[in-house]
Amino acid sequence: MARTPRNTLSADLIVRTALELMEAKGTDAFSLRGVAGELNVGPMALYTYFRNKDDLYDAVRDHLMGLLPAVPSDEPWPDQVRAVCRSLRLLMLQHPCLAQLLASRPLAGDETARVAEGLLGVLRSAGFDPETAARTHTTLFTYVLGAASWEIQMAAERRDPEAWRRLRTTMESLSARDFPTVVELASELARTTGGDEQFDYGLDLLLAGLQVQVRTPS
């Protein structure tokens, strides 16, 4: 591998390289030494830009969160919330490492704060009091993160023939006497493990409850 030319190493290049490695190997296998090796520089060269691995994690997460579109300003607040949640889920499905980064360090980074600012601003403008807006933001964030993480894991199992076979064997071996409802609804449970329709179903339930709570400003 050719050595990175002098004076071309930058924070942006390091972040993009780190993202490529995370997406290829997962965040658990990621290391600063691996990034340095990919760039063909010594590990100490990275410390000019990032203090440690967590610092680089935060930079990768900020880079990805910066790809989210702005909150649409010309729609009713439920549609604004729906747009934010859908965009965040889609970004996590496109970049599965983002789900891990958000789960491990959810409150760090300017871009995460920017997204939170947009969603909280929508909720406050809709008439939510400060505590309800904060609780609603946390509820929506954890719903999106949980739903996306579940879909990512299920997709990984489907790509692994042995894991998928074990799952099917487990479901098929359940006793109808001990688990009558699970067995009865096995096909429905399999059909609703993920996807746009299922995500929107859960999101619509949350929004329906929220619209009951808030008094829409006249």
Image (spheres, rainbow, N blue to C red):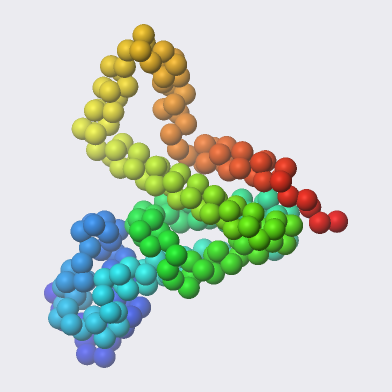
Q: Is residue 194 above or below residue 145?
A: above
Q: Is residue 34 left or right of residue 201?
A: left
- Left or right: 38 as drawn, with respect to 156: left
Q: Nearer the viewer, residue 5 or 100?
A: 100
Image quadrant containing the C terminus: bottom right
Figure disc tally: 0
Residue ID at (28%, 23%): 170
List the single residue furthest toward the bottom. 7
Position in image of residue 39 (x %, y %):
20, 76
Residue 85: in sight, yes or no? no
> Camera-side residue: 116 or 27?
116
Q: Position of residue 70 (x, y in %)?
A: 59, 66
**Which quarter of the figure has residue 77?**
bottom right
Assign the N terminus to one quadrant of the image: bottom left
Identify the residue at horizontal 30%, vertical 42% (top origin). Answer: 156
* Residue at image coords 29%, 79%: 50
Q: Is residue 176 left or right of residue 38?
A: right
Residue 51 visible in the displayed image: yes
Q: Residue furthest front?
A: 131
Quadrant hosting residue 9: bottom left
Taking depth in this image into account, of 53 and 134 the one nearest to the observer is 134
Residue found at the very far top of the displayed protein:
177
The percent position of residue 109, horizontal first and vertical second, equals 44, 71
Question: Against 13, is 29 above or below?
Answer: above
x and y percent of residue 60 in the render? 36, 68
Q: Residue at x 26, y 22 (%)?
A: 169
Residue 155 higher or lower than 217, as above or below:
above
